[in-house]
Amino acid sequence: METLLKILEELRPDVDFQENKALIDSGELDSFDIVSLVGELSEAFEIEIGAEDIIPENFNSVEAMMALVTKLQED
């Protein structure tokens, strides 16, 4: 979780990722942020995030992102 928070804070230092549970729905993260985030997560966690995984539910909160990372690491 610490690595994920570090990546997010570097990407968007203006967003409170720990408190915001609707990052996509509220517009805090846009499509450009998601593209950057997918690349960073893939590299940091040595996972492959497929197009089918790039849905708002997987990026709306830190917890959802961590769940996605964990799921892909187990696959």
Image (tube, rainbow, N blue to C red):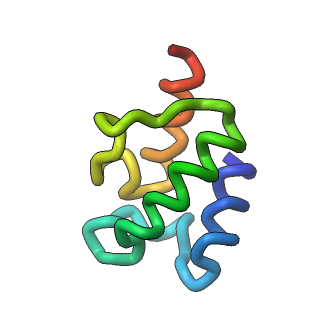
In this view, the residue farthest toward the bottom is 14
- Look at 59% across and 31% down and name the residue there: 47
Apparent side of residue 62 relative to residue 1 in the rendered image (left or right): left
- Look at 55% across and 64% down and name the residue there: 18
- Look at 43% across and 45% down and name the residue there: 64
Q: Is residue 36 above or below residue 30?
A: above
Rendering quarter of residue 54: top left
Instruction: Report x, y in % for residue 4.
Output: 65, 52
Q: Is residue 69 above or below residue 15?
A: above
The residue nearer to you, when weighing 38 against 64, is: 38
Q: Is residue 14 above or below residue 64?
A: below
| Total numbered labels placed on residues in the image | 0
Instruction: Report x, y in % for residue 73.
Output: 59, 23
In this view, the residue farthest toward the top is 75
Instruction: Report x, y in % for residue 36.
Output: 53, 61
Instruction: Report x, y in % for residue 16.
Output: 55, 75
The residue nearer to you, when weighing 18 against 74, is: 74
- Look at 54% across and 41% down and name the residue there: 66
Rendering quarter of residue 31: bottom left
Q: Is residue 62 above or below residue 46?
A: below
